[in-house]
Amino acid sequence: MAIPLGIIINRFASFRNIVLNAGSVSQTIPSLAMLAFLVPFLGLGDAPALVVLTFYALYPILRGTYTGLESVPPECIEAADGLGFSNFQKLRWVELPLALPVIISGMRVATAMTIGIATIAAFIGAGGLGDFITQGLALNDSSLILLGAIPTALLALSFDYGISHLESQLNHRKTKLSKHPRVKEAILVVICFILLILVGNSFFKEYINKRSESVVIASKNFTEQYILAELMAQLIETKTPLKVIRKFNLGATDIIHQALLRGNVDLYPEYSGTAYLTVLKEPFNSGNEPVLNKVRSAYKEKFKLIWLEPFGFSNSQSLAVKKDFAQKHQTHTLSDLALISNNLRIAAPPEFLKRADGLPGLSKVYGLTFKKMMQVDPNLMYSAIENQKVDVIAAFTTDGKLQKHNLVTLKDDKDFYPPYHAAPVIREAVLISHPEIQETLAPVLGLISEEKMTDLNYKVDVEGLTPAEAAHQFLVEFNLI
């Protein structure tokens, strides 16, 4: 598509500025924002990733094609005219062979760019090496980050070297290539064949996954979610013939909720308070009916989603400070913090800074006004407060890292937060087709206390177990597998 468009704007100047300017602007759109925008329309997985990768690869090839055709020496065009070549013959036998090295150069840039962007697609469940990077960030595990980053860099360098070698050969052997056009045709066939294999393999895997008896289990992007998702996955794998497809680390609540509604995800752990405030957008303190009951009935009526029984603990949000800071400033509640917040710095995940049950709501109720706000990954907050880059971080009451970093959570003395009971959320259609899922998960529901969940998080965040290992230990301890 990019090469024909490059040829068109070379021939028709009236379209040139519009197309080139639009292409330049398109490159300024953040790739992660584009992926998030496409998820409601294309769902999770390969489809939005392929669209975004194609989108960002177009402009370098388009620009390379246009620049290459513009750089063809005028005397070559005149010679072709003198020989009576038609416009197509000039393009086929003169312009494209001479422009090919520059076109290949554009492909070289596009390839390096798409390899880098492909890792970001892990945030929407597209898999690949980006999974290692995002999981490494979530678990603060540098070895996992390197496991994804090093092969990605080597892949980019390998493709860059291969394409640059081809570019060099084209620059030095234009004559040979023009005498043997089948060489160029062979190169084109090989490229198309490789693309066909890659795309075909992707759709084949998706087809097999959909046709097989499987359940897709998802999670958000922090330790506790990984552990809860693994608990469910391992129970279902052990106790039923269903194949479990893991789509962990899907990021924000809105993304994972939309994936559930579209059928890209079947089951994941959610919190009643998050569902109540963020998904249902209910006002605070609306009535005496328990939040979980409201959420359960609203989800079934509006979304055809079923909330199973809670896991047994509530993971409320709060703000945390160093213990010595709390003692020095006599800060034990959020009201205490509000008195000195205008001199403090806070680090929090993007969701916390935007959501109604995050900083905006806290600021309204408690009058919090921080000197500086840093938007960071949930697990990088701890490095920030440990290195004294910030004074306050967003935290959860079951977070295993609180003990490691000598932090204390501040009491919500005005009862701002609703209960955050963790529970599995499953599509009603899946539960009807596979009622054994509810029976399989029943033994673990109500079994996990707040202390036990904190201990599981600690084992992963501090002791270095993987979420799968921590989940397996728990299930073995309680004779569930």
Image: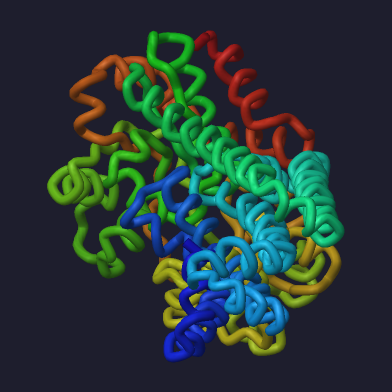
Residue at horizontal 51%, vertical 19%? Answer: 234
Residue, x 49% and y 86% (percent of image)?
16
Q: Quadrant of residue 65?
A: bottom right
Relative vertical location of residue 271 with respect to residue 280 in this rendering, above or below: above
Residue 313 x %, y %: 46, 39
Model colouring: rainbow
Residue 37 sits in which quadrant? bottom left
Q: Is residue 424 left or right of residue 384?
A: left
Nearest the eye: 451 or 466: 466
Q: Nearer the viewer, residue 105 or 254?
A: 105
Side of 459 relative to 219 (left or right): right
| Residue 432: image location, x then y, percent | 18, 24
Can residue 373 be seen here? The reply is no
- In the image, 9 versus 63, the foreground residue is 9
The residue furthest left is 301
Decide which of 397, 355 is in the foreground and name it: 355
What residue is drawn where x is 47% and y is 73%?
354
Q: Is residue 239 visible?
A: yes
**Residue 451, position as x, y percentages in the image:** 59, 36
Query: Which residue is found at the position 80% from the left and 73% from the top?
Result: 389
In the rendered view, would you say 289 is above or below 131? below
Q: Position of residue 108 (x, y in %)?
A: 72, 59
* Quarter of the image where one finds residue 97: bottom right
Q: How many marks?
A: 0
